[in-house]
């Protein structure tokens, strides 16, 4: 280990020995997944409502669909870095601070939930209309169409969407480091960029790439595994 | 019994109002296999979707077992739909469920206990000959097998009616024949009233008792299959039953005779005797005859000899033998 560390800058060695780098990896993973989980708690129902209330959906409600759609679009069209600044007061209101990991999670959720909603909406809309029609012909109430037809039939697409969402949130999380949150992004910016240690920047980059690859491969494997259409 | 009274359905779209159905009056009796035939876009699917109110009629009544479906509250309508099974051209199976899971689906919706549902589903899969494929997923099945699963699923809740929207249109002739055979058996053995939508005359021919011909949103004619096959009144029925005879009309000149077979023992002796007795060669331009219970039904178009006297001899022969015919232009 010492031999490997001898190739790195003193700053890197110091960070490593104090466990900062290890913590950075952990923070990146947990901030990403925690934010993704909360973003799904909001985005999944929102996406379902968007698809169900749409014109061709099982329960069209024009005004509701239009209203939600506009709100989602507003958040989706704002660049993350600007959204983050604009939402500082919101973070303060929700978690009592506009700095640190807690504030960062609020930012990530606000940015990701509308994204997740659109992702879910498009997955649900891919469900074969004929299957929904058959379910209706069998006297299925709308709520059961959602739980027994739409969600199970869209499952593989939903998982693929989740993988894409998580990777996107991970990308955002590096940017969110600028408001004082942790993770590999913060490490790269504060110790790598600001103190001119390129090895820390590159090390963070490589780690992020590896984490993305692992999430991607593992997620796609699950999606393939649970899709009964092919084979 | 399904009674459709004065039904009308129009769609309001961006490009204007489309009248998909108008002046529809039909009575479908218990125990029969009722066909609805028409060209693509005639309104067949819309009509069958009005029977279980998947499509809400613009006007008119749909009365099933004496119940006017339009007056039913939502929950009662959902319940009523469980007594009207439906199958589709595209099978519409749940792709992420096994065969058994698909057949269990309507039972879950109907609130059955899990074990009871499975037992009932297995029973139905045996009925349609797929007991061995319970654990398979739809993507592993052929079209014919998928339709069998769909039939088992549609019958799970013991419906009195089965609606079939182009159920065999995506199948090859072999599978089509098998599915039709299965439907016939379900009708005879379980007493399920079947409504079959199709654009193919051979489907009607094969299993229907009565048929309605629908053209441009309206019913052109209704009658027993034998009636409509032998003496179609509407232009559209003639076109559907003898599509090729219209082509004959278009390409050949001269006088022609359309001979109609209404159940004479066989077609062949008629023509051969005609040739022998009249001493004229007869040119058969078109023949489409079918066999119902050993009797011939259908039509044949023959070209009359140019010589008027010979032509009259042919006509006289047909008259004496009481064979019906029509002079064609
Ligand atoms: N949901 C709909 N919106 C608008 N027009 C429709 C809709 N469903 C059917 N139609 C129109 O109604 C007519 C009849 O359609 P359909 O019942 O599907 O015919 P068929 O099943 O005989 O081919 C067609 O002109 C079709 O375009
Ligand atoms: Mg159709």
Image (cartoon, coloured by chain):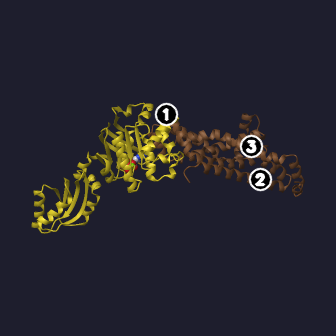
Chain colours: A brown, B yellow
Q: Is residue A145 left or right of residue B269?
A: right
Circle 2 packing at 10 Å, graded few (<14), some (14-19), many (20+), is few
> Which element type, helix, strand or loop, lies under badge 2?
helix
How far apart marks 2 and 1 lie (CA) works out to 52 Å
> Which element type, helix, strand or loop, lies under badge 1?
loop
Disc 3 under 8 Å from ligand 1? The reply is no
Which quadrant of the view contains residue B260? bottom left
How far apart marks 3 and 1 lie (CA) works out to 43 Å
Q: Is residue B179 left or right of residue A154?
A: left
Letter of the chain that mark 2 sits on in the rendering = A
Circle 3 packing at 10 Å, graded few (<14), some (14-19), many (20+), is some
How far apart marks 3 and 2 lie (CA) works out to 15 Å
* Near-viewer residue (A196 or B75): B75
Report the residue marked by disc 1: B112
Q: Are marks 3 and 2 in contact (CB under 8 Å)?
A: no
Report the residue marked by disc 2: A207
On-image quarter of the C terminus of chain A: bottom right
Q: Position of residue A75 (x, y in %)?
A: 64, 44
* Near-viewer residue (B80 or B131): B131
Residue A71 in sight from this viewpoint: yes
Residue B329 in sight from this viewpoint: no
Q: Position of residue A3 (x, y in %)?
A: 89, 57
Letter of the chain that mark 1 sits on in the rendering = B
* Near-viewer residue (B131 or B77): B131
Q: Is residue A57 left or right of residue B310?
A: right
> Which element type, helix, strand or loop, lies under badge 3?
helix
Letter of the chain that mark 3 sits on in the rendering = A
Report the residue marked by disc 3: A30
Q: Residue at x 32, y 46 (%)?
A: B35
Does mark 2 fall on the same chain as mark 3?
Answer: yes
* Near-viewer residue (B15 or B115): B115
Circle 1 packing at 10 Å, graded few (<14), some (14-19), many (20+), is some
């Amino acid at each position: 280990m010492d031999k490997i560390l001898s190739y790195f800058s003193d700053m890197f060695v110091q960070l490593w020995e104090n466990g900062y780098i290890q913590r950075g990896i952990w923070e990146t993973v947990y901030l990403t997944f925690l934010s993704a989980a909360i973003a799904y708690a909001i985005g999944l129902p929102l996406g379902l409502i968007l698809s169900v209330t749409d014109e061709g959906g099982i329960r069209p409600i024009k005004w509701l669909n239009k209203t939600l759609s506009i709100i989602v679009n507003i958040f989706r069209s704002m660049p993350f870095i600007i959204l983050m600044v604009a939402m500082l007061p919101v973070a303060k209101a929700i978690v009592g601070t506009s700095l640190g990991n807690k504030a960062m999670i609020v930012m990530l959720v606000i940015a990701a939930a509308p994204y997740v909603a659109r992702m879910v909406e498009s997955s649900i809309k891919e469900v074969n209309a004929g299957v929904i029609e058959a379910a209706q012909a069998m006297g299925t109430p709308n709520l059961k169409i959602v739980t027994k037809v739409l969600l199970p039939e869209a499952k593989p697409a939903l998982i693929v969407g989740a993988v894409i969402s998580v990777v996107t949130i991970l990308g955002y999380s590096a940017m969110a480091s600028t408001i004082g949150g942790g993770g590999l992004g913060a490490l790269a910016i504060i110790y790598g960029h600001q103190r001119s240690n390129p090895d820390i920047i590159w090390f963070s980059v490589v780690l992020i790439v590896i984490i993305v690859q692992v999430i991607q491969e593992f997620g796609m494997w699950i999606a393939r595994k649970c899709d009964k259409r092919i084979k | 019994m399904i009674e459709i009274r004065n039904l009308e359905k129009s769609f309001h779209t961006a490009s204007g109002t489309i009248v998909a159905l108008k002046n529809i009056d039909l009575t479908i009796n218990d125990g029969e296999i009722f066909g609805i035939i028409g060209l693509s876009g005639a309104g067949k699917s819309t009509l069958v979707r009005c029977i279980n109110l998947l499509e809400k009629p613009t006007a008119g009544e749909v009365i099933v077992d004496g119940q006017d479906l339009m007056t039913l509250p939502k929950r009662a309508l959902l319940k009523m739909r469980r007594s009207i099974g439906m199958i589709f051209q595209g099978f519409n199976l749940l792709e992420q469920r096994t065969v058994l899971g698909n057949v269990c689906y309507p039972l879950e919706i109907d609130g059955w206990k899990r074990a009871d549902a499975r037992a009932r589903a297995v029973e139905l899969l045996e009925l349609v000959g797929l007991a061995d494929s319970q654990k398979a997923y739809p993507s592993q099945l052929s079209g014919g097998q998928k339709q069998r699963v769909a039939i088992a699923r549609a019958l799970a809740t013991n419906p009195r009616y089965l609606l079939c929207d182009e159920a065999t249109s995506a199948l090859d002739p072999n599978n089509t024949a098998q599915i039709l055979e299965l439907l016939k058996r379900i009708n005879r053995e379980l007493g399920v009233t079947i409504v079959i939508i199709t654009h193919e005359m051979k489907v009607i021919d094969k299993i229907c008792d009565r048929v309605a011909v629908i053209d441009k949103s309206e019913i052109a004619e209704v009658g027993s299959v034998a009636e409509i096959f032998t003496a179609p009144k509407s232009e559209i029925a003639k076109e559907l039953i003898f599509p090729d005879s219209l082509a004959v009309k278009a390409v050949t000149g001269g006088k022609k005779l359309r001979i109609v077979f209404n159940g004479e023992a066989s077609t062949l002796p008629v023509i051969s005797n005609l040739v022998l007795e009249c001493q004229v060669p007869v040119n058969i331009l078109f023949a489409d005859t079918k066999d119902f219970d050993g009797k011939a039904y259908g039509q044949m178009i023959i070209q009359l000899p140019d010589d008027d006297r010979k032509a009259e001899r042919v006509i006289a022969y047909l008259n004496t033998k009481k064979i019906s015919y029509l002079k064609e232009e």
